[in-house]
Image (cartoon, rainbow, N blue to C red):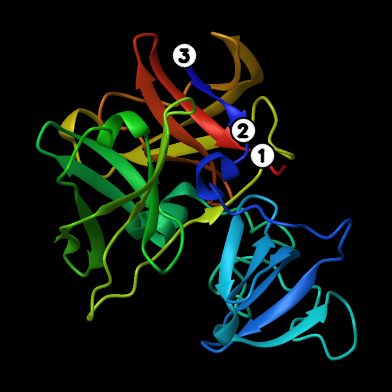
Amino acid sequence: MRWCLPVAVTAVLGCGLWGEAPVEAAPEVIALRDGHQVTGEVVAEKAGALYVDLGFDILRIPRDQVIQRGKLGEAGSPLAPSTRAGSDADPTGFTFNGPLRAAPVKELVHQYGEAVISIETPSGKGSGFIVNDDGYAVTNAHVIEGETRISAILYQNVPSGLARRRIEDVEIVALNPFMDLALLKLPPQKDLKYNHVVLGSLEDLNAGDGVFAVGNPLGLERSVSQGIVSTRNRNLEGLVFLQTDAAINPGNSGGPLFNLRGEVVGVTSLNRRGARAWASRSP
């Protein structure tokens, strides 16, 4: 069996971002210069940036990118409260006002598969996934810890199937060895906009619900495996894991575990006990 640890994604993505937070602040809608919109609680306001709690991550927004702010549901707010993550009105997926719609695994893999990447170092290979269009990506700490040269392989949909694209000079932004997580930054590409996943929650995920993993097990690039959640609460070595029967093998390390709406609910990880995945929960 495989396991998933239910902890907040902010364990690595929000590293060092917490500042003075307003008490019980209402969610705000923030419109950006590039046409994107973000909904969440502003937990800190600094001279050059706002820090917004999305429920599963803390997002830093430069002040010069903000063109409008408003309380959720207020007249004149830049975003209607019915807009949902991944909808046509919010293609970025950062706004998390409700779940995505369920779809067949084949469609979800086609839609979000380009955000799943292969991580290569001089000593090994693993998986990862891009979490925003700036090129930030998540993988396991053990995949890249101690490495000085990291590359990412993207798999782009083309009429003939998938085309590989190699990105060099990937940067390590943060490490959390306890949770076996790492945050990476892929350098900008003039001719490429990074596709990214939508981060989900465990709040409505139960035993028996379907999940699927995408990664590079045993060197078999862009493999997909499907299973169910066996239990949400499996205690191993003092940590509480999700348990799933989806096939996970070496090389899946750092890859995403999706629910059947295409939201990432876990990160697969390998250790001496075999395959396991940890999964995000809204704090």
* N-terminal-most mark, 2 or 1: 2
Q: Residue at x 15, y 40 (%)?
A: 121
Q: Residue at x 21, y 70 (%)?
A: 159
Distance Cα–Cα, label 3 vs label 1: 21 Å
Q: Front-most of 247 and 219?
A: 219
Q: Secondary structure at mark 2?
A: strand
Q: Residue at x 51, y 51 (%)?
A: 104
In the rendered image of this protein, does residue 250 appear above or below residue 74?
above
Q: Residue furthest left?
A: 122
Q: Quadrant of residue 63?
A: bottom right
Distance Cα–Cα, label 2 vs label 3: 19 Å
Q: Quadrant of residue 203?
A: top right
* N-terminal-most mark, 3 or 1: 3
Inspect the image, locate mark 2, and give the three-letter code of the amino acid beneath it: Val
**C-beta proximity under 8 Å, tags 2 and 1:** yes
In the rendered image of this protein, does residue 144 appear above or below residue 35?
above
Q: Residue at x 29, y 60 (%)?
A: 186
Residue 231, how many percent across, how many down?
A: 64, 19
**C-beta proximity under 8 Å, tags 3 and 1:** no
Q: Can you identify the residue that label 3 sits on?
A: 1
Residue 173 placement, left or right of 69: left
Q: Front-most of 71 and 92?
A: 71
Q: Secondary structure at mark 1?
A: loop
Residue 4 placement, left or right of 130: right
Residue 204, how many percent across, how many down?
A: 74, 40
In the rendered image of this protein, does residue 242 appear above or below residue 186?
above
Distance Cα–Cα, label 2 vs label 1: 5 Å
Q: Can you identify the residue that label 2 sits on?
A: 7
Inspect the image, locate mark 3, and give the three-letter code of the amino acid beneath it: Met
Mark 3: give few (<14), some (14-19) or many (20+) Cα within 10 Å: few
Give the number of the disc on residue 281: 1
**Residue 216 appears anywhere in the view:** no
